Image: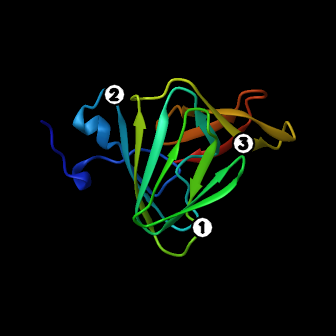
């Protein structure tokens, strides 16, 4: 048995105000678990994305999260849970005025087959993107896989 206190888990760089990789702290192998706190305007991820090899569940503990999908928006309020099957595109965000606190669970474990879509001003279209750590290790860049243009950063 393993037990951790969420507040004791170090945060990591993400598009959310606070992300704590709880599954890493617990040592889970077959499930990813992340604790999120989103300030107004924050997102769970830097763009519309999918995991082809993982289903994802979000439990909203407080606040209201809005998930953009290819089929429209889904609003998930405190006490509600939403499931995204492998291949479902989504981007969760906090469109409200109060903080969103949520737990994300993914199975199986860490996803290795996904796609992240963002608008690229250089390409003039929505293109596939990915993320890389900057040389100084203080930020994560989100960059276009077509032209290598950096379209966002997270610190």
In the figure, is residue 93 to the left or right of 29?
right
Secondary structure at badge 2 equals: loop
How far apart marks 2 and 3 lie (CA) works out to: 29 Å
Image mark count: 3
Q: Going from the N terminus, do you reach mark 2 or mark 1 first?
A: 2
**Outermost residue to the bottom:** 97
Residue shown at 82% from the left, 44% from the top: 121
Which dot marks residue 30? 2
Residue under numbered circle 1 = 95
Which dot marks residue 118? 3
The answer to whether mark 2 and mark 1 are in CB contact below 8 A is: no
Mark 3: give few (<14), some (14-19) or many (20+) Cα within 10 Å: many
Q: Going from the N terminus, do you reach mark 1 or mark 3 first?
A: 1
Mark 2 vs mark 3: in front: 2
Secondary structure at badge 3 equals: strand
In the figure, is residue 8 to the left or right of 71?
left
């Amino acid at each position: 048995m393993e037990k951790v206190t969420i507040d004791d888990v170090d945060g990591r760089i993400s598009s959310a105000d606070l992300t704590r990789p709880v599954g890493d702290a617990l040592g889970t192998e077959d499930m990813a678990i992340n604790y999120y706190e989103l300030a107004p305007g924050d997102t769970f991820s830097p763009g519309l994305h999918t995991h082809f090899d993982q289903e994802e569940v979000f439990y909203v503990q407080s606040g209201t999260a809005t998930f953009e999908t290819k089929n429209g928006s889904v609003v998930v309020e405190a006490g509600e849970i939403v499931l995204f099957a492998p291949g479902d595109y989504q981007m969760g965000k906090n469109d409200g005025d109060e903080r969103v606190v949520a737990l994300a669970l993914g199975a199986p474990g860490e996803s290795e087959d996904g796609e992240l879509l963002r608008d690229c001003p250089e390409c003039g279209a929505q293109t596939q993107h990915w993320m890389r750590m900057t040389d100084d290790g203080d930020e994560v860049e989100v960059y276009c896989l077509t032209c290598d243009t950096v379209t966002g950063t997270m610190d």
